[in-house]
């Protein structure tokens, strides 16, 4: 079977990507395809979550072994948990900021024996994947930019509590 996923981001309304993958391939294959298409640094941790219809997280399928009950991306085939259209996945690609892509099965079709393409493949898409990691500098800059330059008068603030140069009051 061939599963067609629609991938979207809550950070960009313009972005989407349709990816097809064989049901016998692993979540790691899907992870690698997303990483490659997005031109992300594959050394960063990422994880998949099986989710319900309201995107509430359930089982995690991890890149790293986190203990005896860990489901590993490179061991779990897509078909183990996903069987029908409209089923959803959450792909968390920035664990520190809890940023994710949303995946939903749009269609499932029989595998065509004459199809010589290498799966997974991106069929169509628009917009750009979000950046992989939001750095602290950009976050600080975004927070600072919420204030207008006119909101603060540095000279006025300095004049209220002048530094006395280390002299103690007599």
Image (tube, grey):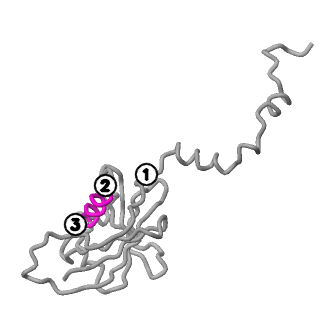
| In this view, the mark in front (3 or 1) | 1
- Which residue appears at 76% of the width and 45% of the height? 151
**Marks 2/3: CA distance?**
24 Å
Q: Earlier in the sequence, mark 3 or mark 1?
A: 3
Q: Is residue 30 magenta?
A: yes
Q: Is residue 144 left or right of residue 47?
A: right
Q: Report the mark closest to the observer, 2 or 3.
A: 2
Find numbered disc 3 in the image and state the secondary structure of the residue it sits on.
Answer: loop
Crowdedness of circle 1 by 10 Å Cα count: few (<14), some, many (20+)? some
Q: Residue at x 41, y 62 (%)?
A: 92
Q: Counting other residues with Cα less than 10 Å from the Cα at mark 3, is it few (<14), some (14-19), or many (20 or more)?
A: few
Q: What is the span of residues highlighted in magenta in the rendered image?
A: 28-39
Image coords of residue 135 (percent x, y): 48, 46
The residue where tag 3 is placed is: 75
Nearer to the camera, 14 or 56: 14
Residue matched to label 1: 133
As measured in the structure, the alpha-carbon distance from the residue carrying label 3 to the one carrying label 1 is: 26 Å
Tag shown at residue 39: 2
Q: Quadrant of the N terminus?
A: bottom left
Query: For the point 30% across and 66% down, which residue is it?
Result: 71
Going from N to C along the chain, the mark reached first, 1 or 2, is 2
Seen in the picture, residue 165 relative to 160 is either above or below; the reply is above
In the rendered view of the protein, which quadrant contains the C terminus? top right
């Amino acid at each position: 079977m061939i599963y067609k996923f629609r991938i979207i981001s809550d950070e960009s309304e313009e972005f989407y990507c349709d990816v097809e993958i064989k049901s016998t391939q692993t979540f790691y294959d899907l992870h690698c395809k997303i990483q490659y298409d997005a031109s992300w640094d594959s050394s960063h941790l990422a994880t998949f979550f099986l989710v319900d219809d309201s995107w509430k997280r359930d089982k995690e399928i991890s890149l790293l072994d986190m203990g005896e009950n860990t489901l590993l991306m490179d061991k779990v085939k897509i078909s183990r948990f996903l069987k029908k259209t409209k089923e959803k996945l959450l792909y968390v690609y920035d664990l520190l900021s809890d940023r994710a892509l949303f995946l939903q099965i749009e269609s499932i079709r029989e595998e065509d024996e004459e199809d010589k393409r290498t799966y997974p493949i991106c069929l169509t898409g628009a917009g750009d994947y979000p950046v992989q990691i939001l750095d602290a500098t950009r976050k600080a800059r975004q927070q600072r930019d919420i204030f207008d330059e006119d909101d603060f008068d540095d000279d006025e603030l300095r004049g209220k509590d002048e530094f006395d140069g280390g002299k103690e009051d007599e």
